[in-house]
Image (cartoon, grey):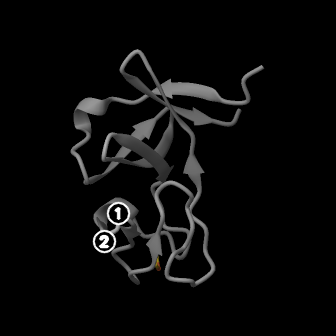
């Protein structure tokens, strides 16, 4: 049995290497397409809730929060600048060229 409820993402809104905020099944998430992979994560920074999609990617593809510049790995959510926060990430599946994000029920 599948743990997740899967929801299709509108990929027409995605631009390579650009953070995009979208509403999927009532959840506000951030989505990133980078080097043929897609990542999804909570739209609000785990530090003080800044909108992460107003931030940018650094040279290694990490998300930089626009507020205090903490950085996060978009795949694992790891806080690569070491402040001790974790970005919540969502699983992604690609089926028949469509992209799905998984939410726990
Ligand atoms: S709100 Fe994102 S680093 Fe502080």
Task: Estimate the x, y position of residue 100 in percent, counting from the top left.
Answer: 48, 28
Is residue 98 found left or right of 12 in the rendered image?
right
Give the residue at x 56% y 58%: 76
Q: Quadrant of the C terminus?
A: top right
Q: Is residue 83 above or below residue 90?
A: below
Q: Is residue 41 above or below residue 50?
A: above
Is residue 91 found left or right of 28 in the rendered image?
right
Contact, mark 2 vs mark 1 (Cβ under 8 Å): yes
Return the residue found at the far right.
1
Q: Quadrant of the N terminus?
A: top right
Give the residue at x 39% y 64%: 51
| Cα–Cα gap, marks 2 and 1 | 5 Å
Give the residue at x 54% y 75%: 47
Task: Estimate the x, y position of residue 21 in percent, counting from the top left.
Answer: 35, 49
Q: Secondary structure at mark 1?
A: loop
Task: Estimate the x, y position of residue 67 in percent, counting from the top left.
Answer: 37, 79
Name the mark on residue 61.
1
């Amino acid at each position: 049995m599948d743990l997740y409820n899967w929801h299709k993402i509108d990929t027409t809104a995605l631009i390579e290497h650009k953070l995009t905020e979208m509403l999927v099944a009532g959840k506000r998430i951030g989505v990133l397409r980078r080097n043929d992979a897609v990542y999804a994560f909570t739209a609000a920074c785990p530090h003080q809730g800044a909108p992460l999609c107003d931030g940018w990617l650094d040279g290694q593809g990490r998300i930089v929060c626009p507020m205090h510049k903490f950085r996060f790995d978009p795949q694992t959510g790891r806080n690569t600048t070491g402040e001790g926060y974790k970005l919540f990430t969502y699983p992604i599946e690609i089926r028949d060229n469509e992209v799905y994000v998984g939410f726990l029920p």
